[in-house]
Image (cartoon, grey):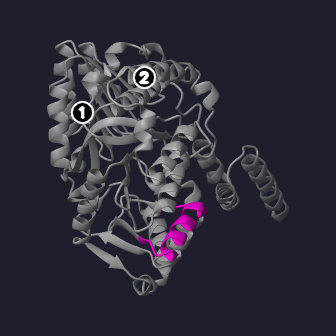
């Protein structure tokens, strides 16, 4: 019996090593998977089958390169034909730090600077959904919606019914949702929309299934584009909890942007790419001018920004690199809000260097978990960063879900990407990086307001926790690269 057990252990160990090293990945994730496979022989391999295999993006995104090239040519032509100074002159007028960030995204994400935008910051569910519903009801030609979560609850039904009404009126409606993030919402929920000519699809639904075992890569983006002229991007999803209707979370604190101007082109482009990768039999014509109205009509304000995406279809980790560059550029302040704080070594080093260089580094996290294992890892990293003089606050007035960064007086980021491994490497994310003093001031004022409802965490407070709590935090931290 002992010999059989020894043989099983040896075979499991060999298979674990061969399985993990068969695909290239970073060292931290490699060791985390090896630990899981070694200590949970059967369960570990089952988990790896669903969550550990890398994305076969060449097969999944066969159309994306061609679609992206066609849209890029169209958008560039529209931008050049638009009124006002050229993009080059616009970029030259910005600060050196802003120009360096713009150049970074142009190189690693092929993301041009979007000029002449009007941006409204929305930080409560009531305001966001009022703006969203009003904008949807005003749609005359197209509505494109992409959310990680689209629940079939009271709010979800209300939004769906608005979409049904607009589809009946002849508006071309497309809805893309993540099947895991929208658990419980099936195709039947969207049947009334489809019955009147609308379209709805789960993200990569023909590819991500139990046969292919690709359940670990989620569409975490939140994009809405109406008539190609108004867009939304940020942290809110569709569901009652985002209006504070769930007792478990109470008040829901999030941040979203309403955008009009040339940046909407890029939100539209990313939606079209995601839709065509998912609904292969209902592909949208990416160069249809209906989706990209004349820039002269679209120009609304003075805000400069870039729409940046990242995901497992690329090894560049574009949004993470943007976060790191923002931290590096900070001279006075770097204020971060995130529900999940599980940074990798490069991000931790950037935060520590900034704090030890005299930058006011603050990080605000929730006071409660929505995913217990992830929250224990968040607590561990909050403790470690507090040791380096970084101010860590826990938001006390409900659940903090905002993903924002404010740097000095003129740089900011708002989007869907959390400050964790999953958003950096595994999820499909989208963020707006903004170069505008007024928007940054608005975000900073909101941050200061949130601080009045937050509690500063101290190293002494962390160290007074029970040994069992500290053990759970350390254990969660070991698996943080694959959470």
Magenta highlight on residue 354: yes
Q: Could you tell me residue 177's position as x and y percent?
A: 37, 33
Callout 2: SS = helix
Left or right of 211? Residue 394 is left
Decide: is 123 above or below 233. below
Q: Nearer the viewer, residue 83 or 286?
A: 83
Would residue 450 be visible to someone looking at this image?
Answer: yes
Question: Start and end of the magenta stretch?
Answer: 342-360
Residue 69 placement, left or right of 231: right
Quadrant holding the N terminus: bottom right
Residue linked to disc 1: 300
Q: Which residue is mark 2?
A: 75
Query: Which comes before the other along the chain, label 2 or label 1?
Result: 2
Q: Residue 297: within the magenta? A: no
* Alpha carbon distance from label 2 to label 1: 17 Å
Q: Main secondary structure of the magenta part?
A: helix
Residue occupying image coordinates x 28% and y 44%: 257
Expressed as whole percent of the image width and height from the top left, the position of residue 360 reads 40, 72
Q: Position of residue 443 (x, y in %)?
A: 28, 56
Q: How many marks?
A: 2
């Amino acid at each position: 019996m002992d010999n059989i057990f020894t043989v099983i252990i040896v075979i499991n160990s060999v298979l674990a090593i061969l399985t993990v090293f068969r695909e290239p990945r970073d060292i931290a994730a490699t060791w985390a998977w090896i630990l899981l496979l070694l200590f949970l022989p059967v369960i570990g391999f089952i988990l790896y089958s669903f969550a550990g295999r890398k994305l076969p993006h060449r097969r999944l995104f066969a159309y994306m390169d061609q679609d992206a090239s066609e849209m890029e040519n169209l958008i560039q032509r529209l931008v050049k034909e638009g009124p006002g100074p050229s993009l080059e002159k616009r970029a030259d007028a910005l600060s050196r730090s802003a120009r360096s960030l713009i150049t970074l995204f142009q190189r690693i994400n092929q993301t041009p600077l979007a000029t002449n935008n009007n941006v409204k910051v929305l930080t409560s569910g009531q305001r966001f959904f009022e703006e969203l519903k009003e904008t949807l009801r005003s749609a005359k030609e197209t509505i494109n919606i992409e959310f990680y979560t689209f629940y079939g609850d009271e709010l979800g039904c209300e939004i769906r019914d608005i979409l049904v009404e607009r589809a009946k009126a002849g508006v071309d409606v497309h809805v893309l949702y993540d099947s895991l993030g929208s658990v419980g919402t099936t195709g039947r929920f969207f049947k009334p929309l489809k019955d009147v000519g609308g379209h709805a699809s789960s993200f990569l639904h023909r590819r991500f299934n139990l046969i292919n075992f690709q359940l670990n890569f989620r569409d975490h983006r939140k994009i809405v584009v109406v008539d190609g002229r108004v867009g939304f991007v940020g942290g809110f999803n569709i569901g009652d909890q985002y209006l504070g209707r769930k007792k478990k979370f109470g008040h829901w604190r999030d941040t979203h942007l309403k955008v009009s101007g040339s940046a909407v082109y890029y939100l539209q482009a990313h939606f079209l790419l995601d839709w065509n990768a998912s609904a292969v039999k209902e592909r949208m014509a990416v160069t249809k001018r209906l989706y990209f109205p004349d820039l002269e009509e679209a120009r609304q304000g003075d805000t400069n920004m870039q729409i940046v995406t990242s995901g497992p279809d690329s090894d560049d980790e574009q949004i993470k690199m943007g976060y790191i560059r923002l931290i590096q550029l900070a001279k006075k302040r770097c204020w971060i809000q995130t529900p999940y704080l599980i940074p990798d070594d490069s991000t931790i080093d950037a935060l520590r260097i900034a704090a030890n260089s005299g930058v006011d580094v603050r990080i605000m996290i929730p006071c409660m978990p929505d995913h217990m294992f992830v929250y224990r890892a968040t607590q561990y990293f909050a403790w470690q960063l507090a040791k380096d003089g970084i101010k860590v606050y826990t938001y006390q007035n409900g659940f903090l879900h905002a993903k924002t960064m404010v740097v000095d007086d003129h740089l900011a980021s708002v989007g869907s990407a959390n400050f964790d491994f999953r958003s950096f490497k595994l999820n499909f994310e989208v963020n707006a990086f903004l170069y505008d003093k007024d928007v940054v001031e608005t975000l900073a004022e909101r941050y200061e307001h949130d601080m009045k409802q937050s509690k500063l965490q101290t190293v002494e407070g962390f160290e007074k926790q029970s040994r069992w709590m500290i053990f759970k935090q350390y254990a969660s931290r070991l698996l943080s690269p694959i959470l």
